[in-house]
């Protein structure tokens, strides 16, 4: 039903679906443009996906109940959240797929924002591959400040899986991985929505 609604309203299209691993630990890393991103990016994924979600959402009565049942768990995006990290580690060690939005929030202008290092530190420390995902067209359909989305054309691209780099310095490995994955995600966006420069 979600796929049908997205097909009719957003004329959604999926590319690179064959790159999605069907088993094994996996970090799914999309850019973040709309409230609907987690649901839309999961449509062609034929396995359970767990979501790291903004902790404020879990304080909204009703919404908290719903997103917990959709396998979301809270993260404080303004601090190093050890509890969220432990939950992600437990899930990945159990061979699950976890979706993390490394920008930590929706883009305000459609441009890809800095990728925070948390997801990439997890990948490097656990040896977990990353599936970069580009969501294109979402900002035009549902920009910040608009209450409901307008009909549009969304394309979601699943890029080849990226293994964590071999590096003796874990922090440098995570930074290198973040730069690479951000470049992959941005490569499928219009030029004006790509970052001005690689993250430091």
Image (spheres, helix red, strand yellow):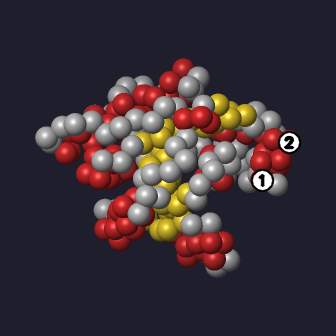
Looking at the image, is 104 positioned above or below residue 115?
A: below
Q: Is residue 118 visible?
A: yes
- Position above or below: 40 against 113: below
The Cα–Cα distance between marks 2 and 1, rounded to whole angstroms, is 10 Å
Mark 1: few/some/many CA within 10 Å (<14, 14-19, 20+): few
Specify the quadrant that holds the N terminus: bottom right
Q: Earlier in the sequence, mark 2 or mark 1?
A: 1
Check the image and name the residue furthest to the right: 8
Front-most of residues 80 and 122: 122
Measuring from the top left, give residue 187's x and y in whole percent: 50, 24
The secondary structure type at the circle numbered 2 is helix
Question: Which residue is farthest left?
Answer: 168
Report the label total: 2
Identify residue for label 2. Answer: 8
Q: Quadrant of residue 114?
A: top left
- Residue occupying image coordinates x 42% and y 42%: 130
Residue 41 x, y percent position in the rendering:
62, 46
Quadrant containing the C terminus is: top left
**Disc 1 marks which residue?**
2
Q: Residues within 10 Å of mark 2 (few under 14, many from 20)?
A: few
Q: Is residue 188 above or below residue 85?
A: above
Quarter of the figure with residue 94:
bottom left
The quarter holding residue 154 reads: top right
Query: Which residue extends farthest front?
Result: 23
Percent x, y of residue 2: 77, 53
Q: Residue sitting at 47 percent across and 68 percent down?
A: 74
Observer able to see residue 34: no
Q: Secondary structure at mark 1?
A: helix
Q: Residue at x 47, y 58 (%)?
A: 96
The numbered dot on residue 42 is none
Residue 145: % across, % down? 67, 49
């Amino acid at each position: 039903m979600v796929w049908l609604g997205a097909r009719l309203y957003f004329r959604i299209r999926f590319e690179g679906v064959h790159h999605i691993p069907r088993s094994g630990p996996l970090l799914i890393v999309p850019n973040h443009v709309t409230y609907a991103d987690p649901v839309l990016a999961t449509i062609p994924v034929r396995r359970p996906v767990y979501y790291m979600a903004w902790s404020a959402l879990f304080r909204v009565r009703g919404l908290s109940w719903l997103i917990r049942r959709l396998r979301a768990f809270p993260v404080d995006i303004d601090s190093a959240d050890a509890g969220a990290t432990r939950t992600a580690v437990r899930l990945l060690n159990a061979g699950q797929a976890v979706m993390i939005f490394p920008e930590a929030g929706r883009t305000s202008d459609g441009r890809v924002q800095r990728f925070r290092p948390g997801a990439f530190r997890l990948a490097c420390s656990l040896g977990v591959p990353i599936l970069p995902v580009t969501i294109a067209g979402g900002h035009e359909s549902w920009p910040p400040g608009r209450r409901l989305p307008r009909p549009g054309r969304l394309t979601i691209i699943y890029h080849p899986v990226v293994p964590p780099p071999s590096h003796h310095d874990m922090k440098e490995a995570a930074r290198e991985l973040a730069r690479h994955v951000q470049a992959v995600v941005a490569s499928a966006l219009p030029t004006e929505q790509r970052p001005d420069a690689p993250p430091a």
